[in-house]
Image (spheres, rainbow, N blue to C red):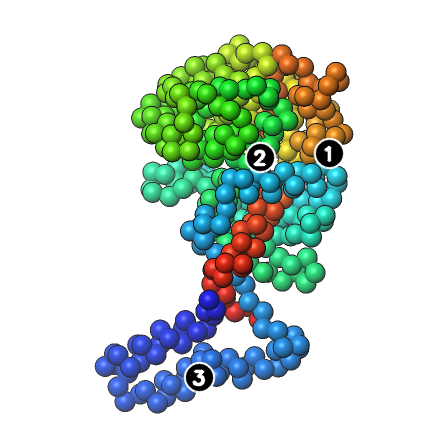
Amino acid sequence: MYLSVDCIVFKVFCLLIFKMPIFAGHRTKCIWFLIPFSSFGQSLFLLDSRKRLKGVLMDVLWLTEEDVSAHLTMDDAISAVEKAFLDHGRGQTQMPPKSYLYFSKPEGDLRTMPAFLEGQDLAGVKIVNVHPKNPEIGLPTVMALLVLNSPKTGAPIAVMGATFLTSMRTGAAGAVAARYLARPESKVVGLVGAGVQARTQLLGLSRIFEIERVIVADRSIESAKAFAEYAKTFLDCEYQTTAGAKDACDCDILVTTTPARAPVVVKEWVKPGTHINAIGADAKGKQELESALTGSAVVVVDDMAQAVHSGEVNVPISQGVLRPEEIYAQIGEILVGKKPGRTGGANGIGGEEVTIFDSTGLGIQDVATGTVVYRRAMDAGKGIHLGFL
């Protein structure tokens, strides 16, 4: 569907001019005013630019959150994110650390995340906020917009709502990390936090592991119960709900998805051999795991520069409990074989060691996953084409 912004303006003004009495007697003048917004007017005004562009009228595909959710599955996201991590591990990406604007009334932040996957020739930038109090006014904590660009020309080719996409690619990242860092026979998942992100974390893990039991911990027991009811729609297993984070640690894979700035999980609660996906810490000062736990575990990050600044490791590093050089690897290095994972043989991570994946969320994940959505939507003829040049 092609619908330019100018075309929308033209149609709205036409309705006003011919339906509202106030314009009676002035309609001829008004029509002359509207000519530039009509298809005929656009043709006149864009004639030179079309010639300059050799007959190509540029447009941008707009995809709503509904469009994105209709064209993205967790399996798609896992595949896209794994390829992005592989590119990162090979050194075939450009991705500056996130840039932040911080707000205090109320507390929140706004981030930009540009990325270029050189191996796949994909580029774009995501703009995303995190406002923990948004649910109190009926808005999501996280809202995002993704722009995909052509590396050849720099032109934007698509703009899409990326709130659902952000949640899915983060769940996919946790699944990919657990595939390489958790024990293959893992069957029990513990979740600290029962929000939207916890849902996609469990969904991602369910695509990799044969899960038999899920322990859901949230300060609101009602939220934990609601989560369990929702999760039953995609994972048939035993569910336990609790208000205590300690209970959730009786597991093989532990996932933390809170906005905490003080530890919610301590070292003595975690069993040997547990793998932890630490998802919630994504800004300076945030911390979900006790520093002693992080300092004693095998830590893998998604991106070193970003994690040191704003990941789960940022607080232990600032406290001197963990040094950056003690971080075991970036996940991409494990995927490409530069470092062994949990099943990497004699030199790999031992079965009794606790592993932590520090997931800060990367622009390459967004661009790779968003490209899947864009291509699916184009093939299906979905979305709205907005005139750009």
Closer to us: 126 or 308: 126
The kind of secondary structure element at disc 2 is helix
The answer to whether any part of residue 201 appears in the image is no
Q: CA distance from mark 1 to mark 3?
A: 58 Å
Q: Please name the amino acid that badge 3 sits on.
A: Ile
Q: Residue 286, position in %: x, y?
A: 53, 29
Tag 2 residue: 173
Q: Earlier in the sequence, mark 2 or mark 3?
A: 3
Instruction: Give the SS element for disc 1.
Output: loop
Task: Residue at the far top: name it.
Answer: 268
Q: Quadrant of the C terminus?
A: bottom right
Left or right: residue 80 compared with residue 90: left
* Residue 216 percent location from the top left of the image: 41, 23
- Answer with left or right where residue 235 lies relative to residue 156: left
Q: Amino acid at mark 1?
A: Val
Q: Earlier in the sequence, mark 1 or mark 2?
A: 2
Residue type, mark 2 in image: Ala
Front disc: 1 or 3: 1
Q: Nearer the viewer, residue 275 or 219?
A: 275
Task: Sort mark 1 into few (<14), some (14-19) or many (20+) by Cα contacts within 10 Å.
Answer: some
**Horizontal relation, residue 244 to residue 272: left or right:** left
Instruction: State the residue position of label 1.
Output: 336
- The residue drawn where x is 59% and y is 21% is 184
Q: What residue is at 64 percent from the left and 52 percent from the top?
A: 123
Is 45 located above or below residue 257 in the figure?
below
Mark 3, residue position: 35
- Distance from the alpha carbon under mark 2 to that under mark 3: 51 Å
Q: Nearer the viewer, residue 65 or 70?
A: 70
Task: Residue at 64%, 80% (x, y): give it.
Answer: 51
